[in-house]
Image: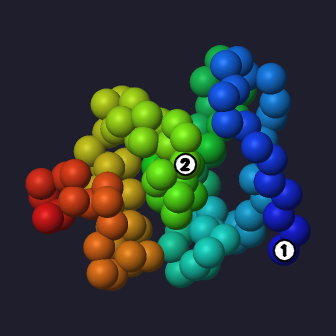
């Protein structure tokens, strides 16, 4: 796997596109860090105004590995306010799988404390 990172601290406008390469089966998105974590393609890739994008629960799962990174907590807070109960449940379940000893975002949700 090839990983390229860049410093976007202090970024004030969207002036880049980030590509995330992952595996998938015919019917499911496979999380790169644990391919036992999947999400049906129809729920993983959403479309708004003809533009496909990755579901917020998947984005947050990736961001969950570095919750102290600038902006990630704000992203979590903003996305949680818009996500459905099903999306939140999927995220919390996967966070529990990836972090059996606990995770900051699980502690913030009273159902998982």
Is residue 73 found left or right of 20 in the rendered image? left
Tell me the SS state at disc 2.
Answer: loop
Q: Nearer the viewer, residue 14 or 22?
A: 14
First of labels 2, 1 by sequence position? 1
Q: Which residue is disc 2 drawn over?
A: 69
Residue at 58%, 78% in the rendered image: 34
Residue 39 in sight: no
Which one is closest to the eye, mark 2 or mark 1? 2
- The correct choice, above or below, for 65 with respect to 102 in the image is above
Residue 11 visible, this orientation: yes
Q: Is residue 39 above or below residue 13?
A: below
> Disc 1 designates what residue?
1
State left or right for residue 70 relative to residue 3: left
In the rendered structure, are the residues bearing label 2 and label 1 in contact, judged by CB atoms less than 8 Å apart?
Answer: no
Crowding near pointer 2: few (<14 within 10 Å), some, many (20+)? few
Where does the C terminus fall, quadrant-wise?
Answer: bottom left
* Percent coordinates x, y for residue 80 in the rendering: 34, 38
Q: Residue furthest front?
A: 10
Which secondary structure, mark 1?
A: loop
Q: Position of residue 4 (x, y in %)?
A: 85, 57
- The location of residue 108, given as percent across then percent down, is 22, 52
51 to 18, vertically: above or below: above
Checking the image for residue 58, the label placed there is none
Q: Residue at x 48, y 52 (%)?
A: 68
Task: Give the residue at x 38% y 57%.
Answer: 91
Q: Is residue 77 left or right of residue 72?
A: left
Kindly report the distance in space between the C-alpha atoms of the residues bearing marks 2 and 1: 22 Å
Give the image quarter of residue 45: top right
């Amino acid at each position: 796997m090839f990983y390229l990172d860049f410093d976007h601290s202090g970024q004030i406008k969207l002036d880049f596109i980030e590509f995330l390469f992952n595996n998938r089966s015919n019917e499911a998105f496979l999380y790169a860090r644990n391919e036992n974590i999947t999400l049906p393609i129809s729920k993983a890739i959403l479309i708004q105004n003809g533009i496909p994008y990755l579901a917020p629960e998947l984005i947050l799962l990736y961001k969950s590995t570095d919750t102290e990174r600038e902006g990630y907590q704000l992203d979590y807070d903003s996305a949680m306010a818009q996500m459905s109960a099903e999306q939140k449940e999927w995220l919390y379940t996967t966070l529990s799988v990836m972090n059996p000893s606990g995770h900051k975002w699980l502690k913030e949700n009273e159902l998982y404390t």
